Amino acid sequence: MAEFLEDISDCPKCNLCKSRSRVVLGAGNEHAEIIFVGEAPGVQEDKQGIPFVGPAGQFLDQLLKSIELDRADVYITNTVKCRPPDNRDPEADEIAACNPYLKKQLRMIEPRIICTLGNYATKTILKTSSGISQLHGKLIRQGELAYVPLFHPAAALHKPPLRNVLIEDFERLQQHLDAEKVRWKTILDEPPESLSALEPEGQAEQMGLF
Ligand code: URA
Ligand code: SF4
């Protein structure tokens, strides 16, 4: 990941390159089972080169602690890697320009659960038009991967009632994680002879597998 950051540290692919001090790629465990994807670096992140180190990040740290995790256990990144001027929202062309980097990170880390923080990350990653108000706290499985959309911690700093919603959603996230661990174990423990590809042909045909 350090090499990857070096490769993109002069990235000129969108307008955000003009206002950033540095590219903020991500931080945490590069083999994490859970990855959190926020929106964009803010002023503190742009200064320090680390995601979620400002007020929203402090709340995220508390939320992680509430389910016995800390930054070193998870990986944290953003939908766009450079700070938008005056903290404006990232634009569609900027999100599209930066998306290959996020995809590359996901391929490198191979997380089991992807938590999207807020609408931008949720819509970009899940390619959904449903908003975060409908999806928050739900486990959405796609193949072996699972997604859990969550409100952005910064939203709770502006709208205090969302604070408790996030605290409850993190409790649900912990339950989802426990359930996923059982599911991964089942997938990994499955004896090879039980795989459908090795079943007698007739039976497999009967089950409509081919
Ligand atoms: N908000 C984000 O979405 N990302 C950060 O890194 C900090 C605040
Ligand atoms: Fe490049 Fe992404 Fe930064 Fe745009 S936001 S300049 S695409 S690294």
Image (cartoon, grey):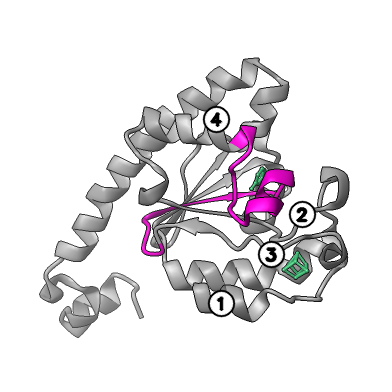
Label whose residue precedes the other's in the sequence (3 or 4): 3
Q: Is residue 164 above or below residue 191?
A: above
**C-alpha span from label 3 to label 1:** 11 Å
Q: Residue at x 41, y 64 (%)?
A: 30
Q: Which residues are magenta?
A: 30-56
Q: Amino acid at mark 1?
A: Phe
Number of marks in the rendered image: 4
Give the residue number, with chain letter if any, for mark 2.
83
Please give the residue where the numbered disc 1 appears in the rendered image: 4
Image quarter for ligand 2: bottom right
**At label 3, which amino acid type do we have?**
Val
Name the N-terminal-most of marks 3 and 2: 3
* Mark drawn on residue 27: none
| 11 vs 144, nearest the viewer | 11
How far apart are labels 2 and 1 at the CA level? 18 Å
Question: Is residue 62 shown above or below 164?
Answer: below
